[in-house]
Image (tube, helix red, strand yellow):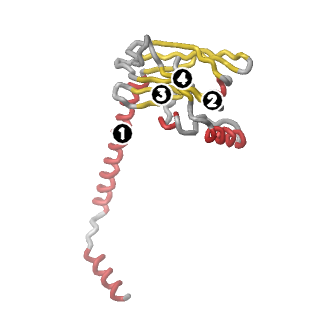
Amino acid sequence: MDDFLRGLGKLLGTLQIGNVAEWVGAVATVGALFWAFLVFRSDRLRSRRAEADRFTSYIVSATFMGDYSTAKYEFFNAGDTPVPLAYLVVRQPNGGNRIPLKFNGSYVLLPGTQMSFRLRLEQHSSETYSYVYFRDSHNREWLRDIITGKYVPVGRETVGPWLRYRGGPAARWKQFRQNRQGTPPKFREI
């Protein structure tokens, strides 16, 4: 053991760790490189989302009719490039629909295209979760919650959880179980 400690002492004695100014400079350099990487990544994400943000979707009105409701959806491509593919994804506790958006028989929504339609919902619109799935001109996939306008992971469309859970712990657990036991979404064209 003494030989080990003497060897370690000799090794540490021969190391030259430099002065404090060199250490501070090295840490500052690494920090600056990390900060530059974060800024670059943020700018890149912002430029990607700029094109996706030009495709707008919203619910204009909702009408309650007893056990069900209807909602009027509107979509508008305000960008300079076409949207090659878009779907309205409607999720309800008892299942859902994935409706392709077609304008004049084409799935491509050209710049300036505006479309709207009314959809009957099996549940009230407050119990329905609507997303718009679309691809931009660079073939990047986006999934945006129509109500909040926030982007969600694309896997949320087909893999749970489909809902934004609400209520107390028992209600959240019930919604989670419904999502896990739900059937795959139905596909339907308008």
Q: What residue sits right under mark 3 in the picture? A: 133
- Are discs 2 and 4 less than 8 Å apart at CB? no
Tell us which disc is closer to us: 1 or 3. Answer: 3
Q: CA distance from mark 1 to mark 3?
A: 24 Å
Helix, strand or loop under label 2:
strand
Which mark is drawn over residue 41? 1
In the displayed structure, does residue 95 sit left or right of residue 46? right
Q: CA distance from mark 2 to mark 1?
A: 36 Å
- Are discs 4 and 3 less than 8 Å apart at CB? no
Mark 2 surroundings within 10 Å by alpha-carbon count, few (fewer than 14), some (14 through 19), many (20 or more): many
Q: CA distance from mark 4 to mark 3?
A: 15 Å
Residue 162, quarter of picture: top right
Mark 3 surroundings within 10 Å by alpha-carbon count, few (fewer than 14), some (14 through 19), many (20 or more): many
Residue 94 image position (x, y, % from top left):
65, 31
Q: Residue furthest right?
A: 66
Helix, strand or loop under label 3:
strand
- Are discs 4 and 1 less than 8 Å apart at CB? no
Quadrant holding the N terminus: bottom left
Q: CA distance from mark 4 to mark 1?
A: 38 Å
Which mark is drawn over residue 92? 2
Helix, strand or loop under label 4:
loop
- Are discs 2 and 1 less than 8 Å apart at CB? no
First in sequence: mark 4 vs mark 1: 1
Residue 180 image position (x, y, % from top left):
61, 41
Which mark is drawn over residue 188? 4
Q: Residue furthest top?
A: 104
Tell us which disc is closer to us: 4 or 3. Answer: 4
Q: Amino acid at mark 1?
A: Arg
First in sequence: mark 4 vs mark 3: 3
Residue that appears at 62% across and 37% down: 182
Q: CA distance from mark 3 to mark 2?
A: 16 Å
Q: CA distance from mark 2 to mark 4?
A: 15 Å
